[in-house]
Amino acid sequence: MYLVSMELYARVNILDGRAVRLPHGDVRDAIALDDSPVNRARDWVAKGADLLHIVDLDAAAYGDYKNRDLIADIIKAVDVPVQVGGGIRSQGEVERVLGMGAWRIVIGTLAIIDQVLFWELNRRHPNQIVVSLDVRPDLEISIKGWTERTGDYLEETLINLSSGGAAGFMISEVGRDALVEPPNFDALKLAVSLVDEPVIAAGGVRGLDDVATLMNVESEGKKLAGLVVGREVTAGRFTVEEVVSALASDGRIRGPWTRADLDAAVASYRDVVSDPIDADTVTVFVEWLASGGA
């Protein structure tokens, strides 16, 4: 048996080639933090972040993709998985960012407004597309940078996108000041209860007390898979080292798995995967494990 804890995602917002902070979620209020996003990313990793969450604000807000080469440099400069969001609204852009070496890509509006394309993207790139959902206090989903209401609500949206192949979900709250107001713990618990994919708290926390509460969000044995931090550390609410230590105390136990467990998992996977070649690859991998990895 071995222990795993909620993973720590460190956020790097990039605007006009610089790392910035958005105190109220609006690019017009951006505060410059570092002229070198590469150095900022390296610093996050050196302090203990498990993964990086990169947001290209120029692409998201203005459809300007001038930061893509810089993001590729970040991916090459660190030795942790990097997921990238911001302005990814087409199959071509999905393939471009994954081709840069991104571990996963994060989409929001596209998953809501074009679910046919979303399904197709997941068929082409299984387990590589995470959906970011911006949730209002009444659990209605907003899109296009919080500017449009959809009439769709968290429960139905999660169920639909889970069936469409999402690799995971990032949940944030529309209009919340993350340094003053608490996360919507009820919304996060609902998300955990509804889907088997990883659910990540992406809206920020006020301090270590909120981190502890997030660690206890649970439904039928399922817990939150990750937490995104950024402004909290910059504002001095806690250090990266402190939150890493807190998350490490989670003590969830997973594995090892028996051969029967693995075979059952492969059988379940075959029921949901559309590409038989992909399923066959998983079967071959299980056989390789059973042989001792030889």
Image (cartoon, rainbow, N blue to C red):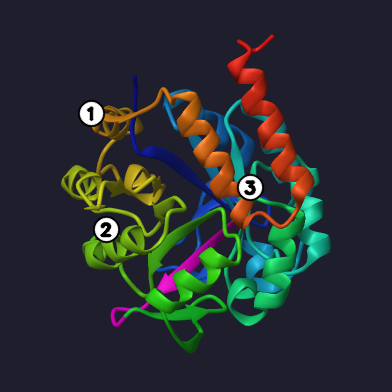
- Give the spatial CA distance, label 3 vs label 2: 27 Å
Is residue 133 highlighted in magenta? Answer: yes
Please provide percent x and percent y for residue 56.
Answer: 64, 57
Q: In the image, what residue type sits under mark 1?
A: Ser
For marks 2 and 1 on the same chain, the one whose residue lies earlier in the sequence: 2
Q: Quadrant of residue 114?
A: bottom right
Tell me the crowding category of disc 3: few under 14, some 14 to 19, or many 20 or more residues within 10 angstroms, Cα based.
Answer: many
Image-based side of 161 in relation to 214, left or right: right
Q: Is residue 202 visible?
A: yes
For marks 3 and 1 on the same chain, the one whose residue lies earlier in the sequence: 3
Q: Nearer the viewer, mark 2 or mark 1?
A: 1
The residue under the point 65% across, 73% down is: 110
Image-based side of 252 in relation to 127, left or right: left
Q: Quadrant of residue 280?
A: top right
Q: Secondary structure at mark 2?
A: loop
Q: In the image, what residue type sits under mark 3?
A: Arg
Q: Which residues are magenta?
A: 130-138
Please provide percent x and percent y for residue 258.
Answer: 44, 24
Tell me the crowding category of disc 1: few under 14, some 14 to 19, or many 20 or more residues within 10 angstroms, Cα based.
Answer: some
Please provide percent x and percent y for residue 270.
Answer: 63, 49
The residue under the point 70% across, 76% down is: 116
Q: In the image, what residue type sits under mark 2?
A: Leu
- Give the spatial CA distance, label 2 vs label 1: 23 Å
Q: Which residue is mark 3?
A: 104
Q: Which residue is mark 1?
A: 249
- Give the spatial CA distance, label 3 vs label 1: 27 Å
